[in-house]
Image (cartoon, grey):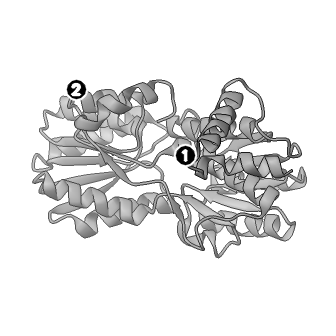
Amino acid sequence: MGAVLAVALAAAGCSSTGGKRAEERAAAAAEGRAAVNTPRWTFAMVTHSGDGDTFWDIVQKGAEQAAVKDNINFLYSHNDEGNQQAQLVQTAIDKKVDGLIVSLAKPDAMKAVVAKAVKAGIPVVTVNSGSAESKEFGALTHIGQDETIAGEAVGDELNERGRKKALCVLHEQGNVGHEQRCAGAKKTFDGTMQNLYVDGTNMPDVTASIEAKLQSDKSIDAVVTLGAPFADAAVQAKQTAGSKAEINTFDLNAKVAGGLQSEKLGFAVDQQPYLQGYQAVDLLWLYRYNRNVLGGGQPVLTGPQIITAADADALADYTKRGTR
């Protein structure tokens, strides 16, 4: 078992041997082979993703690749309705999984079932949403970005770009993280910012709602969407409305990278979703194997990082393969 621990800590080492072992682990994962000989534990990830959400596709990909490396049987399920997400967590508890990863976009709906998991002795890691509630709910740690800090970074960036009136587009009502993003941006933005609530499950409605707002108020010079798929809708709305507003977004994917390169988009806020999935599985494995916990009671931050046209070229290949 000592050899397993050496492999697990290889990434932290600086020796040539450590580097070689890290390369061996990466090669094993790339070939679909486990890089450890620990038991084949089962980890479940239950998120608040809706269908077809490219952000969560990237989270899932990171988790799946870490699961291969760590010899984990990985189960993934999702539902954007809080009560339905809670039922999926209960299903994972009933299966007596060895570890649980959950997002807490709607924490009130998730509190009781996460407490059940903890009481059942299932270690829990929270990802993406719910950093404020994670410790209270009994999770080992939270992996993601602080949504308020991310929002504040957006406000600062809008100031640097000389923007005066911004629109923050919220596509999922009841998502506490989305509210925190817009509130953070409003806090640091020197101009005025309005919230626009849209139905994120209906993209034509999203486009029409943004278009109507831009047509009725030509003084809006910046739009901030809270997810990569909605940036394109905002670009279309801007064109139809004849607006000169700069379109910016949270999250990164291949289309957003292309939009940054062509300057259809001003900037994107990257929280590295692949890392959220990958690290969540890795941390559960480390906890099961060696009782390791990261964060010291604080969230493990994966963002925010402001991405502009100057950065897009370097990230384009990674977005095309679906890992950024």
Q: Position of residue 179 (x, y in %)?
A: 41, 62
* Label 1 to label 2: alpha-carbon separation: 27 Å
Direction from residue 34 to residue 9 in the image, left or right: left
Camera-nearest residue between 173 and 289: 289
Camera-nearest residue between 77 and 251: 251
Q: Is residue 322 above or below residue 21?
A: above
Q: Residues within 10 Å of mark 2 (few under 14, many from 20)?
A: few
Q: Amino acid type of disc 1?
A: Leu
Q: Position of residue 195 (x, y in %)?
A: 31, 58
Q: Which one is earlier in the sequence, the residue at label 1 or at label 2? A: 2
Question: Residue at the location (34% across, 31% down)?
Answer: 314
Direction from residue 290 to residue 29 in the image, left or right: left
Q: Position of residue 62 (x, y in %)?
A: 61, 39
Camera-nearest residue between 90 and 121: 121
Q: Residues within 10 Å of mark 1 (few under 14, many from 20)?
A: many
Q: Is residue 15 above or below residue 148?
A: above
Circles 1, 2 touching at the beta carbon (< 8 Å) = no
Camera-nearest residue between 66 and 236: 66
Q: Secondary structure at mark 1?
A: helix
Q: Position of residue 119 (x, y in %)?
A: 84, 71
Q: Residue beneath label 1, please?
A: 275
Of circles 1 and 2, which is in front? 1
Which mark, residue 36? none
Which mark, residue 262? 2
Question: Residue at the location (58% across, 67% down)?
Answer: 295
Could one spot residue 7 in this view of the protein?
yes
Q: Is residue 36 above or below residue 181?
A: above
Question: Residue at the location (71% across, 49% down)?
Answer: 8
